[in-house]
Amino acid sequence: MAISAPKGTRDFLPDEALFWQQFKATAAEVFGTYGYLPIETPALELTELFVRGIGEATDVVSKEMFTAISGENLKNWVENGRAPERKSRLSLRPEGTAGVVRAVVQHDLVPQGAAPAKLMYAGPMFRAENPQKGRQRQFNQVGVECLGAEEPTVDAEAIIMLMRFFQRVGIPSANMTLLLNSMGCEKCRPAYRDLVKAHLDAHSGELCDTCRTRAEINPLRAFDCKNESCAKVMEQAPKITDHLCDECKAHYETVKALLDGAGVAYVEDASLVRGLDYYTRTVFEVQTDAGLGSQNAIGGGGRYDKLAEEVGGRPTPGLGFALGFERCALALEALGVEMPQAQRLDLFVACVNDEMRAAAFGLVQAARDRGYKADMDHQHRSLKSQFKLADKLNAAKVAVLGPDEMAEGKCQLRDMASHEQLIIGFDEVVDTLGRALA
């Protein structure tokens, strides 16, 4: 039986792989105008990084992480019952922020008093989820992190940048909804957390088992529950925006004022808490109505002013967001945006007979040396089949080398779109191709 890709993973065939490359390049261009620089961190990190950073009570850590065990450790566990020590366990990254913050702390990228570190990343993430449309076990994200600045201008700038990116790749503003909320800080959130816990305790009989557990560990996670009964309970829960301290309230109001000034529309959603424990103050999420069904979030993030301390660094405010490539691709497909075609040639060189192959090979190399995409038949096809191949490869021009024309130092150059055909000097093909493409 043929081996297939694991459940919840998929291959990027050439067209989609090319689109992923262009997607990343567009992100680098857009985010680069805001001062963001690339960073790459390992796909494997110490499990403890995610436990401390994301939160042990989150679904991501408690249910969805892939933990990696070496063959030797697995053998010891199975044969001798000795599980690897927790401090040495590795996990595939379920998200990008914790690893970037770890790198910033480890390499001291934000020395005391230094300018903020603005970083962007792109790559695969891994979660042991039930695969469905828009949700895979291996998926790709593009994200940014800004560490070292706590001003609300950073929050507003990141949100504006995210919306500009979505518009740049082809998702219209009319098809997106920006949700906004504040999670408060260590001064005001504990009291709010207690209010939510009291609300959950008062409605314990209406909650699922998971939310009853959440009430003891982290009551705010109940806002994420999709259980209909739990959702009804949480609709009546106290709102965080009614319990913000003066500093958090001022920060939130400034973020909204900056977005208003930039003409960025948003909807305040007091139930928006995001799925990870490290968030403080501003949180946001972008949803689309284009072809995603219930999995309609295409990006989001927020502020995490305590995360650097959680992973062993000095106090360093931070803010970031991530967006999902696969969900964006689904949204763009639903909107009728055409994906790029990986197979595209500037020039295909066809031979009337095998005696022309050496000349064809030389012409192909000359075109490539000038930066054009060029190819030829390598399987001794008939001339008719060579034209079919040129059409399949989306060739713009086809140079036909025949003995009679070549005896005069000439060849035919056919435009595959208009079917116009010229007889030109063999040595003029590359220059003529350049003028035609320009």
Image (cartoon, helix red, strand yellow):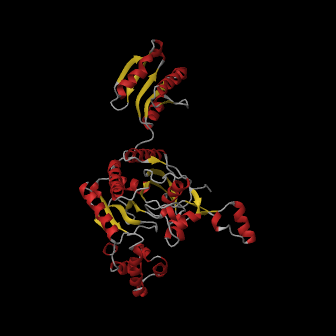
Height in image: 408 above or below 417?
A: above
User: Is residue 306 depicted above or below 4 in this figure?
Assistant: below
Residue at coordinates 26% horizontally, 60% vertically from top-left?
257
- Quadrant location of the N terminus? bottom right
Residue at 40 percent of width and 45 percent of height: 32
Of 272 and 426, which appears nearest the observer?
Answer: 272
Query: In front: 241, or 437?
Result: 241
Relative depth, front residue between 349 and 65: 65
> Image quadrant of residue 323?
bottom left
Where residue 413 sits: x, y (%)?
40, 23
Quarter placement of the C terminus: top left
The residue positioned farthest toward the top in the image shown: 408
**In the image, residue 135 lies at what x, y percent?**
46, 62
246 sits to left or right of 186: left
Residue 190 as seen in the image, left or right of residue 160: right
Asked whether residue 128 appears in the rendered view, the answer is no
Displayed quadrant of residue 280: bottom left
Would you say 311 lies left or right of 271 here? right
User: Residue farthest to the right?
Assistant: 80
Give the total number of marks visible in the rendering: 0
Where is residue 121 drawn, in percent x and y? 47, 51
Say which of 172 and 245 sits in front: 245
- Residue 380 visible somewhere in the drawing: yes
Residue 375: percent from left, percent from top: 49, 30
Q: Is residue 429 left or right of residue 80?
A: left
